[in-house]
Image: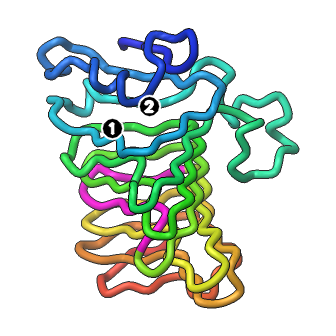
Amino acid sequence: MTDKVIGTGGDYTTIASWFAACPADLVSTTQTWRGLLKNQTFTLTSAVTFTGITTSSTYYIELATDTGASFADNGSVQTNALRYNTSNGAAISCTSAYVIPLINTASMHLRLTKLQIRTSSLAARAINASNNTVIDRCIVEGIGGASASCIALYGSGSRVSNSLVINRKSSSPGPAVSIGDGASLYNCTLAATAATGSVALVGSYGTPTVRNCAAVGVCVFKNAANTQTYT
Protein backbone atom coordinates (compact mmCIF):
# COMPACT_ATOMS: atom_id res chain seq x y z
CA MET A 1 0.00 0.00 0.00
CA THR A 2 1.44 3.36 -1.07
CA ASP A 3 -0.30 6.11 0.92
CA LYS A 4 -0.07 9.75 -0.10
CA VAL A 5 -1.72 12.58 1.82
CA ILE A 6 -3.60 15.13 -0.29
CA GLY A 7 -4.20 18.69 0.89
CA THR A 8 -2.42 21.65 2.42
CA GLY A 9 0.93 20.47 3.78
CA GLY A 10 0.45 16.97 2.35
CA ASP A 11 2.35 15.05 -0.31
CA TYR A 12 0.13 16.59 -2.99
CA THR A 13 -2.12 19.64 -2.79
CA THR A 14 -4.75 18.47 -5.28
CA ILE A 15 -6.48 15.24 -6.24
CA ALA A 16 -5.39 15.73 -9.85
CA SER A 17 -1.70 16.04 -8.97
CA TRP A 18 -1.90 12.94 -6.78
CA PHE A 19 -3.39 10.88 -9.60
CA ALA A 20 -0.91 12.29 -12.13
CA ALA A 21 1.91 10.88 -9.98
CA CYS A 22 0.46 7.37 -9.97
CA PRO A 23 2.79 4.74 -11.49
CA ALA A 24 1.60 3.62 -14.93
CA ASP A 25 1.53 -0.06 -13.98
CA LEU A 26 0.47 -0.88 -10.43
CA VAL A 27 0.42 -4.59 -11.16
CA SER A 28 4.08 -4.90 -12.19
CA THR A 29 5.19 -2.65 -9.32
CA THR A 30 2.84 -4.48 -6.90
CA GLN A 31 1.40 -1.27 -5.47
CA THR A 32 -1.97 -0.04 -4.34
CA TRP A 33 -2.02 3.73 -4.89
CA ARG A 34 -4.06 5.36 -2.12
CA GLY A 35 -4.76 9.07 -1.75
CA LEU A 36 -5.84 10.28 1.68
CA LEU A 37 -7.72 13.59 1.75
CA LYS A 38 -7.02 15.94 4.62
CA ASN A 39 -9.93 17.48 6.49
CA GLN A 40 -10.62 20.31 4.06
CA THR A 41 -12.75 21.07 1.00
CA PHE A 42 -11.37 20.21 -2.42
CA THR A 43 -13.06 22.32 -5.10
CA LEU A 44 -12.83 20.83 -8.57
CA THR A 45 -13.39 22.94 -11.69
CA SER A 46 -12.49 20.12 -14.08
CA ALA A 47 -12.91 16.37 -13.98
CA VAL A 48 -10.45 13.95 -12.43
CA THR A 49 -10.55 11.14 -14.99
CA PHE A 50 -9.08 7.85 -13.84
CA THR A 51 -7.49 6.34 -16.93
CA GLY A 52 -4.17 5.13 -18.34
CA ILE A 53 -3.09 2.98 -15.37
CA THR A 54 -2.75 -0.81 -15.30
CA THR A 55 -4.65 -2.10 -12.27
CA SER A 56 -6.12 -5.29 -10.85
CA SER A 57 -8.37 -6.34 -7.99
CA THR A 58 -5.23 -6.66 -5.86
CA TYR A 59 -3.37 -3.56 -7.03
CA TYR A 60 -5.86 -0.75 -7.42
CA ILE A 61 -6.37 2.99 -6.92
CA GLU A 62 -8.21 4.28 -3.87
CA LEU A 63 -9.28 7.79 -2.94
CA ALA A 64 -10.14 7.94 0.75
CA THR A 65 -9.54 10.18 3.77
CA ASP A 66 -6.66 10.72 6.15
CA THR A 67 -6.89 9.44 9.72
CA GLY A 68 -9.85 11.10 11.46
CA ALA A 69 -10.64 13.28 8.43
CA SER A 70 -13.88 11.64 7.28
CA PHE A 71 -17.46 12.49 8.24
CA ALA A 72 -17.60 8.83 9.32
CA ASP A 73 -14.84 9.47 11.87
CA ASN A 74 -16.27 12.73 13.23
CA GLY A 75 -16.54 12.86 17.01
CA SER A 76 -20.27 13.56 16.80
CA VAL A 77 -20.96 11.07 14.02
CA GLN A 78 -23.84 9.45 15.91
CA THR A 79 -25.81 12.70 16.13
CA ASN A 80 -24.70 14.63 13.02
CA ALA A 81 -27.30 15.05 10.31
CA LEU A 82 -26.48 12.62 7.52
CA ARG A 83 -25.85 15.05 4.67
CA TYR A 84 -22.99 16.82 2.89
CA ASN A 85 -21.42 19.09 5.49
CA THR A 86 -17.84 20.32 5.16
CA SER A 87 -17.69 20.88 8.91
CA ASN A 88 -17.86 17.13 9.45
CA GLY A 89 -14.94 16.01 7.30
CA ALA A 90 -13.07 16.07 4.01
CA ALA A 91 -15.28 17.05 1.09
CA ILE A 92 -15.15 17.28 -2.70
CA SER A 93 -17.18 20.04 -4.34
CA CYS A 94 -17.78 20.88 -7.99
CA THR A 95 -19.78 23.92 -9.12
CA SER A 96 -18.71 24.05 -12.77
CA ALA A 97 -21.43 23.44 -15.35
CA TYR A 98 -21.32 20.11 -17.20
CA VAL A 99 -18.30 18.93 -15.20
CA ILE A 100 -18.49 15.47 -13.64
CA PRO A 101 -15.82 15.65 -10.91
CA LEU A 102 -14.90 11.95 -10.72
CA ILE A 103 -14.88 9.72 -13.81
CA ASN A 104 -13.79 6.13 -14.31
CA THR A 105 -14.97 4.88 -17.68
CA ALA A 106 -11.73 3.05 -18.41
CA SER A 107 -12.73 0.07 -16.25
CA MET A 108 -9.79 0.62 -13.92
CA HIS A 109 -10.01 -0.87 -10.45
CA LEU A 110 -10.99 2.16 -8.37
CA ARG A 111 -12.31 2.60 -4.83
CA LEU A 112 -13.89 5.73 -3.36
CA THR A 113 -14.15 5.42 0.41
CA LYS A 114 -15.63 7.57 3.20
CA LEU A 115 -15.92 10.68 1.02
CA GLN A 116 -18.40 13.54 0.80
CA ILE A 117 -18.99 14.57 -2.82
CA ARG A 118 -21.32 17.29 -4.10
CA THR A 119 -21.95 18.78 -7.52
CA SER A 120 -23.93 21.99 -7.97
CA SER A 121 -24.48 21.89 -11.72
CA LEU A 122 -27.92 21.02 -13.04
CA ALA A 123 -26.31 19.21 -15.96
CA ALA A 124 -23.66 17.09 -14.25
CA ARG A 125 -23.38 13.89 -12.27
CA ALA A 126 -21.08 13.63 -9.27
CA ILE A 127 -19.63 10.25 -10.29
CA ASN A 128 -19.63 8.48 -13.65
CA ALA A 129 -18.06 5.03 -13.47
CA SER A 130 -17.89 1.69 -15.21
CA ASN A 131 -16.48 -1.77 -14.41
CA ASN A 132 -14.50 -2.34 -11.21
CA THR A 133 -15.54 0.81 -9.32
CA VAL A 134 -16.40 0.43 -5.63
CA ILE A 135 -18.05 3.34 -3.82
CA ASP A 136 -18.30 2.64 -0.09
CA ARG A 137 -19.42 4.69 2.94
CA CYS A 138 -19.86 7.90 0.96
CA ILE A 139 -22.30 10.81 0.93
CA VAL A 140 -23.06 11.94 -2.62
CA GLU A 141 -25.31 14.91 -3.40
CA GLY A 142 -26.33 16.61 -6.63
CA ILE A 143 -28.99 18.82 -8.20
CA GLY A 144 -29.15 17.11 -11.56
CA GLY A 145 -32.21 17.26 -13.76
CA ALA A 146 -33.59 14.88 -16.37
CA SER A 147 -31.00 12.11 -16.89
CA ALA A 148 -28.27 13.71 -14.73
CA SER A 149 -28.28 11.18 -11.91
CA CYS A 150 -26.00 11.81 -8.93
CA ILE A 151 -24.18 8.53 -9.63
CA ALA A 152 -24.04 6.59 -12.89
CA LEU A 153 -22.57 3.14 -12.26
CA TYR A 154 -22.25 0.35 -14.79
CA GLY A 155 -20.48 -2.92 -15.24
CA SER A 156 -19.22 -6.05 -13.62
CA GLY A 157 -17.46 -5.60 -10.30
CA SER A 158 -18.97 -2.16 -9.66
CA ARG A 159 -21.04 -1.38 -6.59
CA VAL A 160 -22.24 1.33 -4.25
CA SER A 161 -22.48 0.18 -0.64
CA ASN A 162 -23.30 1.70 2.76
CA SER A 163 -23.81 5.12 1.17
CA LEU A 164 -26.30 7.98 1.00
CA VAL A 165 -27.21 9.49 -2.38
CA ILE A 166 -29.43 12.60 -2.55
CA ASN A 167 -30.76 14.56 -5.51
CA ARG A 168 -31.60 18.03 -4.15
CA LYS A 169 -33.02 19.58 -7.32
CA SER A 170 -36.25 21.33 -6.33
CA SER A 171 -38.31 20.30 -9.36
CA SER A 172 -38.15 17.53 -11.97
CA PRO A 173 -34.96 16.02 -10.58
CA GLY A 174 -32.96 13.28 -12.20
CA PRO A 175 -32.63 9.92 -10.43
CA ALA A 176 -30.38 9.45 -7.43
CA VAL A 177 -28.61 6.55 -9.17
CA SER A 178 -28.42 5.14 -12.70
CA ILE A 179 -27.27 1.54 -12.64
CA GLY A 180 -26.77 -1.28 -15.12
CA ASP A 181 -24.63 -3.95 -16.75
CA GLY A 182 -24.29 -6.07 -13.63
CA ALA A 183 -23.47 -3.30 -11.12
CA SER A 184 -25.02 -3.46 -7.65
CA LEU A 185 -26.30 -1.38 -4.74
CA TYR A 186 -26.08 -2.71 -1.17
CA ASN A 187 -27.23 -1.06 2.07
CA CYS A 188 -27.80 2.37 0.52
CA THR A 189 -30.28 5.19 1.06
CA LEU A 190 -31.50 6.95 -2.09
CA ALA A 191 -33.26 10.25 -1.44
CA ALA A 192 -34.89 13.21 -3.15
CA THR A 193 -36.09 16.56 -1.83
CA ALA A 194 -38.43 17.52 -4.68
CA ALA A 195 -42.18 17.28 -4.16
CA THR A 196 -42.86 15.77 -7.59
CA GLY A 197 -41.15 13.90 -10.38
CA SER A 198 -38.42 12.25 -8.32
CA VAL A 199 -37.12 8.77 -9.11
CA ALA A 200 -34.75 6.85 -6.86
CA LEU A 201 -33.27 4.52 -9.44
CA VAL A 202 -32.99 4.20 -13.20
CA GLY A 203 -31.70 0.96 -14.67
CA SER A 204 -30.49 0.07 -18.12
CA TYR A 205 -28.54 -2.77 -19.70
CA GLY A 206 -27.87 -6.12 -18.10
CA THR A 207 -29.23 -7.21 -14.72
CA PRO A 208 -28.14 -5.00 -11.80
CA THR A 209 -28.80 -6.04 -8.22
CA VAL A 210 -30.25 -3.90 -5.42
CA ARG A 211 -30.33 -5.23 -1.86
CA ASN A 212 -31.28 -3.81 1.52
CA CYS A 213 -31.75 -0.24 0.23
CA ALA A 214 -34.16 2.49 1.31
CA ALA A 215 -35.77 5.12 -0.92
CA VAL A 216 -36.75 8.31 0.91
CA GLY A 217 -38.89 11.17 -0.42
CA VAL A 218 -39.09 9.78 -3.95
CA CYS A 219 -42.28 9.54 -6.00
CA VAL A 220 -41.16 6.48 -7.97
CA PHE A 221 -38.65 3.90 -6.76
CA LYS A 222 -37.54 2.62 -10.15
CA ASN A 223 -37.89 3.48 -13.80
CA ALA A 224 -36.16 0.76 -15.72
CA ALA A 225 -36.13 -0.79 -19.14
CA ASN A 226 -34.08 -3.76 -18.02
CA THR A 227 -34.68 -6.67 -15.65
CA GLN A 228 -33.52 -5.88 -12.12
CA THR A 229 -33.18 -8.06 -9.05
CA TYR A 230 -34.42 -6.52 -5.81
CA THR A 231 -34.13 -7.89 -2.30
Front residue of 10 and 156: 10
Label 2 is placed on what type of residue?
Leu
Which of the labelled discs sits on residue 74, or is there none? none
Front residue of 18 and 68: 18
Q: Quadrant of residue 55?
A: top left
Image coords of residue 56 (percent x, y): 20, 31
Image coords of residue 119 (percent x, y): 53, 55
Q: Quick one: SS at disc 2?
A: strand
Q: Quick one: SS at disc 1?
A: strand
Residue under label 2, please give it. 63
Label 1 is placed on what type of residue?
Leu
- On-image quarter of the N terminus: top left
Front residue of 65 and 136: 65
Residue under label 1, please give it. 110
- Horizontal relation, residue 84 to residue 50: left or right: right
Q: Was residue 195 drawn as part of the magenta stretch in this picture?
A: no
Residue occupying the point 83% across, 44% down: 80
Image coords of residue 181 (percent x, y): 25, 66
Image coords of residue 96 (percent x, y): 47, 54
Residue occupying the point 41% across, 77% down: 147
Q: Are marks 2 and 1 in contact (CB under 8 Å)?
A: yes
- Horizontal relation, residue 177 to residue 215: left or right: left
Q: How crowded is mark 1: few (under 14 residues within 10 Å), some or many (20 or more)?
A: many
Residue occupying the point 40% across, 70% down: 178
Dot placed on the residue nearer the N-terminal end, 2 or 1: 2
Examine the rendered structure and indicate whether residue 137 appears above or below residue 119.
Answer: above
**Span of residues in magenta:** 148-161
